[in-house]
Amino acid sequence: MKLPKDILTIPQLSRQNIERILSDAFRFKEYKGAPKARDQVLEGKSIALIFEKNSLRTRVAFETAISALGGHPIFLAGDNILYRAKSDTSRESIGDITQNLDRLAHGIAARVNNHKSLTDIAGYSKNPVINLLCNEHHPTQALADLMTIQWHKGKTTGLKVAFIGDGNNVATSLMDICAVMGMDFSIGSPAGYEIPRKFQDIARSIAAQSNSKLEFTNDPKKAAAGADVIYTDTFVSMGNEAESKKRTGDFKAYQVNAETMKCAKDDAIFMHCLPAHRGDEVAAEVIDSKQSVVFDQAECRLHIAKSLLYLLYK
Ligand code: CP
Ligand code: NVA
């Protein structure tokens, strides 16, 4: 089984790819400490980590995973390499940055504003490129989400996943992974904040093969009805800060609270990619309840990072 050279979106991965990523991730979870000698696939290698936006979980997961597999992570703040301070003028083109990194390092993982930056990087790079979040997708998050579902539900099929809120990068990648794996996915978002039509269409065509049911509604209770997993994310993603006030109003009826959880199955779990904002997209009574698995989900980010890197470099 070979993974694609670059991991930029979930639809690039087959069901077999994803099952293998999950199986190695559970293997790494069992080790608890350092992986075995045969897992040191990054020995003598360095991976450049470009961050145009802030991060806690993704940065720590990938830096730790690279070190655990014997490699050396190199953190590069986006504005140090891409832009001159206080100016929009490019310091250096993406093509030149990538061709330099291809000589100096052995792979690139990047969190960028625009997805196009990633496809540009991937086009220039001979080494693997991993999407660590962009405006449209968050594939390594979706893989960790699937692992968390397997951990808590013991399966990844025959389940309904409900996303309540913004049809954003996290929602899109979650929809995609449900479609690939044959899980039902329902999203309740306010009008104007739906998952973009072009991504719905891609997921619909994948779902037709896997027998996953996809539902797009503006009614959060309808989306949550009978769900095994209730998921939400911030109403104001990085880059949307100027719309904060408007979004707070538009998303008022979309908070996940005890009422929402009542619509789901009694044994439903609550998930959130984090960072969370108690009192906005989720009530404290839910995220701090026994149904919440958000910190297991955060832990899975590390196991998935190790698994992905292992499979790309083994
Ligand atoms: N969930 C997630 O990607 O967290 P960070 O933004 O902190 O990396
Ligand atoms: N949708 C959020 C996810 C953060 C992990 C954002 O893009 O800011």
Image (cartoon, rainbow, N blue to C red):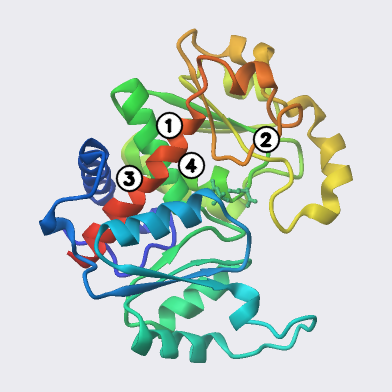
Question: How far is the residue under mark 3 from the one under mark 4?
Answer: 18 Å
Local SS, label 4? helix
Instruction: Give the quarter of the figure containing the C terminus.
Output: bottom left
Say left or right for 151 vs 78: left
Between circles 2 and 1, the one closer to the viewer is 1
Q: Quadrant of residue 285?
A: top right
Judging by the rendered image, the residue that carries numbered circle 4 is 174
Q: Quadrant of residue 142?
A: top left
Local SS, label 1? helix
Judging by the rendered image, the residue that carries numbered circle 3 is 303
Question: How far is the residue under mark 1 from the one under mark 3?
Answer: 11 Å
First in sequence: mark 1 vs mark 3: 1
Q: Establish whether ligand 1 lies closer than 8 Å to the Cβ of label 1.
A: no
Judging by the rendered image, the residue that carries numbered circle 2 is 165
Say left or right for 134 vs 85: left
Question: Please, what is the three-letter code of the amino acid marked with disc 2?
Answer: Gly
First in sequence: mark 1 vs mark 4: 4
Q: Position of residue 134 (x, y in %)?
A: 57, 61
- On screen, 94 above or below 207? below
Q: Determine which of the numbered discs, if any, sits on residue 296 in the image.
A: 1
Callout 1–callout 3 Cβ contact below 8 Å: no
Local SS, label 3? helix
Between circles 1 and 4, the one closer to the viewer is 1
Q: Position of residue 168 (x, y in %)?
A: 63, 48
Residue drawn at x 69%, y 55% as measured from the top left:
238
Residue drawn at x 42%, y 81% as measured from the top left:
123
Question: How far is the residue under mark 2 from the one under mark 1?
Answer: 22 Å
First in sequence: mark 2 vs mark 4: 2
